[in-house]
């Protein structure tokens, strides 16, 4: 008798889907210059249509608010000073920001292009709430669109597989044009800068990247779409830009051998390591004190020119965890100082999860009265590995020096709905059944000089990353996350 366990999905289907993913750029670069497909689910998650529509309404308002806050330079300096004193990296950003905005009392020449991803979880009790704002290196919009296309491919090519694992066979896919809309926003800004200089030819887009980057395919998908729109694209690290940038007439930013730069898009710059250049900063003890100064000054140099920039120093500060906490604690009425109506402000407030500053009083409260499973402790870091949960929170709080309190915040822990039916995750061409999948919803927006630059009033598509509920880290590259997409139910 044959007792072999039946596969979750026929192997020829798995191979076909993995090949589709690789062929369409849904891949991660290996150290040996080969590639592997990104992990993905074989069927999308459901979301109630009214919840989805609410997020489509409120997310551009969040971007409108952040865009205005980011250009309120005195407010950023005053409100984030204590946080910067507690975090060396943000102290450096604040120093650069001060130099950019206060030298001679003039506004820096750069023009802000805010490409932002606002991440949510649909909490079981309180509904959809913001996890964090992402204003720098807010990537994977191309992967978001490709994941939706992959699920459409499964539905059409392998309907029996799709119908077996989807939650609701009557649900309709949520349209996702994240790749196309982000490229449209960038191209719009690039053409505007190019026209301001009365120059002919292709606008020039510079993507600032990390050395030895593994997430190159998501980035290249964006470049290919920009090239389709007539934009010249190049990739440079900060140390390459240090040697290759110069000033032209009328504050034109010039790149060696390629001429005037129209857009600078930072996919690096959110951590000190991105600016580390000991050979430029000096040697010995002085190098420790000066570490990262030279390459970070390259970022300041960029902002002193007439070029569209994402993320500006201001945008990075305005999307910090501390600013998220400040805006969360602030009454909705105060948002009106940045151009929101009271109705718009209340919509934004409706999706902000509770946050608390870290201080002696909140540590005592947490020790004596808090439910440790209802909170997460966060520092200012971007990406995975910067959140502390449950039993690890109090020891971390008690070990913190008081001078570092302002670099941390307590935030309501969100418990999203688990998928009603099991699904299949595909990782490294192998399948596994996940019975408790939960999802993080990232919505992209694009604004240039505070104005929307997409076909959908600033909205620019979505990214869904799902993970088992028992896992804390949901990153696609560094955690247990898988790419996913949305279907709508009434």
Image: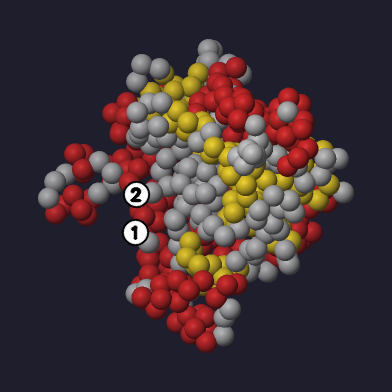
Label 1 sits on a secondary structure element that is helix
If you read the primary sequence from the N terminus, does the residue marked by circle 1 or circle 2 appear first?
Answer: 1
**Which residue shows up at 37% across the image and 58% down it?**
91
Tag 1 residue? 88
Q: Where is residue 86 in the image (x, y as percent from the top left)?
A: 38, 66
**Which residue shows up at 87% across the image and 49% down it?**
490
Q: Where is residue 41 in the image (x, y as percent from the top left)?
A: 64, 40
Disc 1 + disc 2, Cβ < 8 Å: yes
**Which residue shows up at 14% across the image and 54% down it?**
285
Viewer-proximal residue, 353 or 148?
Answer: 148
**Which residue shows up at 65% across the image and 35% down it?**
9
Question: In the shown orientation, is residue 155 left or right of residue 16?
Answer: right
Label 2 sits on a secondary structure element that is helix
Viewer-proximal residue, 6 or 42?
Answer: 6
Q: What numbered label is drawn on residue 272?
A: 2
Rounded to the nearest angstrom, the CA distance separating label 1 from label 2 is 9 Å
Q: Position of residue 32 (x, y in %)?
A: 35, 28
Q: In which quarter of the image is residue 299?
A: top left
Q: How many neighbours does mark 1 have within 10 angstroms: few (below 14), some (14-19), or many (20 or more)?
A: few
Q: What numbered label is drawn on residue 2?
A: none
Q: Where is residue 96 in the image (x, y as percent from the top left)?
A: 38, 49
């Amino acid at each position: 008798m044959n007792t072999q366990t039946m596969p979750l999905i026929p192997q020829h289907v798995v191979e076909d889907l993995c090949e589709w993913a690789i062929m369409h750029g849904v891949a991660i670069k290996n150290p040996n210059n080969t590639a592997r497909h990104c992990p993905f689910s074989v069927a999308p998650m459901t979301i109630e249509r009214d919840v989805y529509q609410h997020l489509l309404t409120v997310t551009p308002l969040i971007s409108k608010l952040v865009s205005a806050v980011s250009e309120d330079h005195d407010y950023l300096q005053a409100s984030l000073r204590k946080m910067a004193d507690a975090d060396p990296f943000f102290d450096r950003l604040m120093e650069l920001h001060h130099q950019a905005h206060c030298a001679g009392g003039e506004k820096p020449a750069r023009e802000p292009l805010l490409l932002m991803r606002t991440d949510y979880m649909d909490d079981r009790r309180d509904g959809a709430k913001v996890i964090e704002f992402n204003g720098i290196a807010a990537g994977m919009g191309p992967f978001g669109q490709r994941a939706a296309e992959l699920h459409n491919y499964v539905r059409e090519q392998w309907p029996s597989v799709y119908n077996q694992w989807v939650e609701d066979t009557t649900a309709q896919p949520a349209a996702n044009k994240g790749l196309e809309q982000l490229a449209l926003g960038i191209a719009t800004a690039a053409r505007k800068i190019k026209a301001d200089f009365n120059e002919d030819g292709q606008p020039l887009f510079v993507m600032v990247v990390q050395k030895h980057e593994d997430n190159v395919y998501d980035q290249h998908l964006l470049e290919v779409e920009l090239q389709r729109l007539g934009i010249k694209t190049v990739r440079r690290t900060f140390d390459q830009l240090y040697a290759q940038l110069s000033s032209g007439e009328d504050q034109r930013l010039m790149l060696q051998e390629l001429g005037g730069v129209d857009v600078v898009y930072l996919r690096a710059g959110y951590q000190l390591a991105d600016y580390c250049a000991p050979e430029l900063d000096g040697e010995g003890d002085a190098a420790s004190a000066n570490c990262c100064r030279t390459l970070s000054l390259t970022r300041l140099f960029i902002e002193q020119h007439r070029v569209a920039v994402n993320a500006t120093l201001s945008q990075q500060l305005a999307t910090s965890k501390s600013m998220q906490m400040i805006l969360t604690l602030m009454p909705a009425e105060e948002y009106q100082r940045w151009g929101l109506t009271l109705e718009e402000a209340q919509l934004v407030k409706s999706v902000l999860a509770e946050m608390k500053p870290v201080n002696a009083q909140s540590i005592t409260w947490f020790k004596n009265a808090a439910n440790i499973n209802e909170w997460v402790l966060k520092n200012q870091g971007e990406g995975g590995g910067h959140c502390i949960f449950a039993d690890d929170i109090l020891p971390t709080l008690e070990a913190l020096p008081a001078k570092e309190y302002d670099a941390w915040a307590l935030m309501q822990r969100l418990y999203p709905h688990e998928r009603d039916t099991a699904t299949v995750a595909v990782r490294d061409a192998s399948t596994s059944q996940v019975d408790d999948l939960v999802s993080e919803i990232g919505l992209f927006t694009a604004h240039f000089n505070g104005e929307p630059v997409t076909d959908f009033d600033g909205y620019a598509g979505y990214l869904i990353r799902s993970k088992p509920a028992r896992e804390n880290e949901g990153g696609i590259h560094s955690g247990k996350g898988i790419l996913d997409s949305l279907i709508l139910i009434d």
